[in-house]
Amino acid sequence: MISSLSTHLTPLSTTTNHILLNLPLGTSKARFSCSAGKTGFFTKLGRLIKEKAKSDVEKIFSGFSKTRDNLAVIDELFLYWNLSDTDRVLDELEEVLLVSDFGPRITIKIVESLRDDIYGGKLKSGGEIKAALKKSVLDLLTNKGLKTELQLGFRKPAVIMIVGVNGGGKTTSLGKLSNRLKKQGAKILMAAGDTFRAAASDQLEIWAERTGCEIVVAEKENVKASSVISQAVKKGKEQAYDIVLCDTSGRLHTNYSLMEELVACKKAVSKVVNGAPNEILLVLDGTTGLNMLPQAREFNEVVGVTGLILTKLDGSARGGCVVSVVDELSIPVKFVGVGEGVEDLQPFDAEAFVNAVFP
């Protein structure tokens, strides 16, 4: 048996036209057609989220404060730089980047590129070297991490699955994402698809109450996750919800039987709404640094991850892992968790990130 826990909702118009979500600062509008109507609810939703992302840039800066402090030594390295000090300075830069979890492959790529440009006469001052460093990191993020905005497709409801290992912050991230979307006027339905952890449904119900959303939960034990999620998507389709957010059980990326359950959930969703899920967002704990890469590889291979949510970046000096993950997997980071508050899940913006971590 599967039941629904209802909370108060303000009905919204179901006439929609386009989707515009989480655009990087300074970029042009990217629109996604929606067949659900002819007037602009989704256009308005996207515009409001874009504006909110701009206003929240300071939170991204504060969230990466430890990484920023760790990289502050770069200014000292370049302040009195001269050509004869190049090798020493670049060796120290390499060490700083590695400590900040930029990863050996990226670090070597960046440092050797700077070395070539310095000895080739293209970079002639410490200021120019730092600017080139920031540009190289930004280029890595923008060239391999395209489509940082949510891709919500052409049919209602849009379906987003949240996946990841135990303890990474999946349920909390789902709750914060629902809060962000709900506050901009979207009609949200949650699916408590974590049927392994006893407290998971209770935790998600608290988020549903907190954000004013409805939720579909399993009424008894041993209900398959795919059944709960399928029922929620059916309800979302029948009752004109804009977005269904599906929680899933945390699982080690090495547990292949549990990983296969995610495949079943994905198939169940697609049977209800053609083309769904629109997004499969992998939650990665930023405090694990480069250890998150094996997780990301396995989840991507099994279910095809479309975007990343990096959490707990407020408590770690390892923000370079953002660059490492994007470079390794070419999967865009869509959100970053920079604190414990309900508003602290921020749309990822590559330019804001680079400015946040490099003082």
Image (spheres, rainbow, N blue to C red):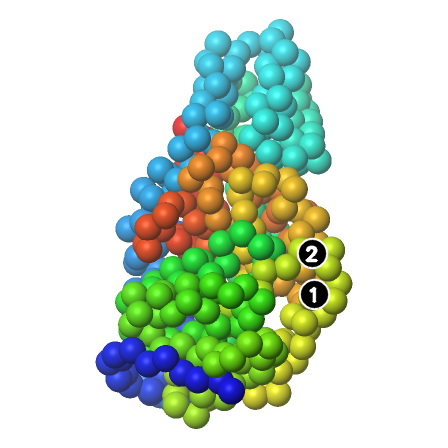
On screen, residue 161 above or below 359 = below
Q: Position of residue 125 (x, y in %)?
A: 51, 18
- Give the residue at x 35% y 60%: 50
On screen, residue 108 above or below 172 = above
Amino acid carrying label 1: it is Met
Which element carries disc 1, helix, strand or loop? helix
Q: Label 1, on which residue?
A: 259
Residue 70 in the figure: left or right of residue 270? left
- Give the residue at x 60% y 9%: 85
Q: Quadrant of the rendered structure where residue 36 is?
A: bottom left
Crowd band around label 1 with a 10 angstrom C-alpha radius: few (<14), some (14–19), many (20+)? many
Residue 24 seen by the camera? no
- Using the numbered discs, state the Cα–Cα distance from disc 1 to disc 2 in whole angstroms: 7 Å
- Is the Cβ of the residue at disc 1 closer than 8 Å to that at disc 2? yes
Which labelled disc corresponds to residue 182?
none
Q: Position of residue 89 (x, y in %)?
A: 59, 14
Q: How many marks?
A: 2
Q: Label 2, on which residue?
A: 253
On screen, residue 283 above or below 319 = below
Residue 359 in the figure: left or right of residue 306? left
Which element carries disc 2, helix, strand or loop? loop
